[in-house]
Amino acid sequence: MPPKVFEAFADVDLILHAGDLVSEEVLVELGALAPVKAVVGNCDPLYLAHDLSFQLKLELAGYRIGLTHGHLGTGNTVPERALSLFEDVDLVVFGHSHSPYNETVNGIHLFNPGSATDRRWEPKCSVGIIELGRGIECRHIFF
């Protein structure tokens, strides 16, 4: 795990991981910083699918949050597929494309933090910070 991840998450209350952990060691490393909620991605080993689900619905600070990897569901794009898996949510956090995404569609916030370790076609790696208060504020940290 890049040191920048530990810096970015030093004061967080909870870490959401949208899959492609690749190793359960990632859960251990992140768990040293804060509690972790994670889902299985398409690049994860099968044994992780026994311990984690493909989607989670959480309620945090009065907001309904869907967490998924984004490779399942219906639609032509990763955000569409991620959104299709949830009803009655305020925020959907997803991964799969490894591309940062931060948009509101039909009143639902869609957020992909990108990837801390595999930037693929992006110029930089990234993680995301979500702040829940009077509203939902999502931002990327690039490194």
Image (cartoon, rainbow, N blue to C red):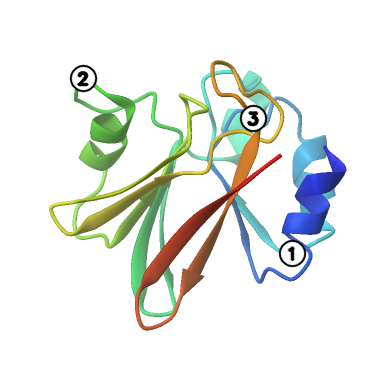
Image disc number at residue 52: none
Q: Is mark 1 on a helix, strand or loop?
A: loop
The amino acid beneath tag 1 is Ala
Query: Which of labels 2 and 1 is toward the front?
Result: 2
46 or 97: which is nearer to us? 97
Mark 2 or 1 closer to N-term?
1
Q: Residue furthest bottom?
A: 134
Residue picked out by circle 2: 76
Q: Distance between the residues labelled 2 and 1?
A: 34 Å
Mark 1 or 3 closer to N-term?
1
State the residue at coordinates (54%, 16%).
121
In the rendered view, would you say 43 is above or below 126?
Answer: above
Residue picked out by circle 1: 34
Q: How far apart are marks 1 and 3 (CA)?
A: 24 Å
The amino acid beneath tag 2 is Asn
Residue picked out by circle 3: 124
The amino acid beneath tag 3 is Lys
Q: Is mark 3 on a helix, strand or loop?
A: loop
Q: Position of residue 97 (x, y in %)?
A: 46, 24
